[in-house]
Image: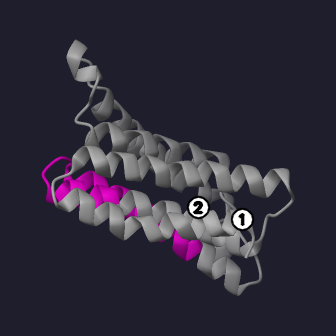
């Protein structure tokens, strides 16, 4: 297993640690864990491209690890009363749709790699979650709802990227 794939696996391993820390009320420590896990996403992609270490495992598991991390965080934040459930349902619906699309494509011998709109969606989510975990710090000092804006931006980008993936890969559904 190469370094980028090890970083992806580290991100997956950090998910239960993150959940336990968050659900025991340690918002700031969970934010640090979430940010560290998010940094592995940036690192694994950069290293894979720079050193030509892109693998089918990475193409599939990297976006899946991102989804598991973000969805775990958002579901916990719903449970804690910090995020509206309907927003997480929209995000989950998109993620299940795209994962299903990728699964059908893989059965046909094709790999659908993450596109730019999906990457932007993930970046927005990975900004929104720590902002929510940090309870909008330091922006609450000036009354700016940064965390809420990032959450809304991520939901909007979730819809846009999901629509783009379905339209771009609609031929997968016809087979």
Q: What x and y, as percent, mark residue 158? A: 46, 49
Left or right side of 67 for 165: right
- Cα distance between the residues tagged 1 and 2: 31 Å
Left or right side of 19 for 120: right
Residue 3 bears which disc, if any? 1
Q: Which residue is mark 2?
A: 166
Q: Secondary structure at mark 1?
A: helix
> Farthest residue toward the bottom?
107
Residue 155 shows in this picture: yes
Marks 1/2 in contact by CB < 8 Å: the verdict is: no
Left or right side of 106 for 157: left
Q: Secondary structure at mark 2?
A: helix
Bounds of the magenta span? 73-101
> Closer to the N terminus: mark 1 or mark 2?
1
Front residue (pair 113, 56) = 56
Residue 141 bears which disc, if any? none
């Amino acid at each position: 297993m190469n370094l980028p794939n090890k970083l992806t696996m580290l991100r997956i391993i950090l998910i239960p640690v993150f959940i336990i820390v968050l659900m025991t009320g340690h918002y700031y420590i969970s934010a640090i864990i979430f940010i560290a896990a998010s940094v592995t996403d940036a690192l694994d992609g950069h290293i894979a491209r720079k050193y030509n270490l892109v693998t089918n495992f990475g193409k599939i598991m990297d976006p899946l690890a991102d989804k598991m991390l973000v969805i775990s965080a958002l579901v916990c934040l719903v449970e804690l009363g910090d995020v509206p459930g309907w927003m997480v349902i929209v995000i989950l619906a998109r993620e299940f749709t795209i994962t299903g699309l990728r699964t059908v494509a893989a059965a046909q011998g094709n790999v659908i790699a993450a596109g730019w709109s999906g990457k932007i969606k993930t970046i927005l989510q990975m900004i929104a979650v720590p902002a929510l975990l940090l309870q909008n710090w330091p922006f609450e000092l000036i009354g700016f709802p940064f965390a809420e804006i990032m959450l809304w931006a991520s939901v909007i980008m979730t819809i846009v990227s999901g629509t783009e993936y379905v339209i771009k890969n609609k031929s997968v559904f016809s087979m």
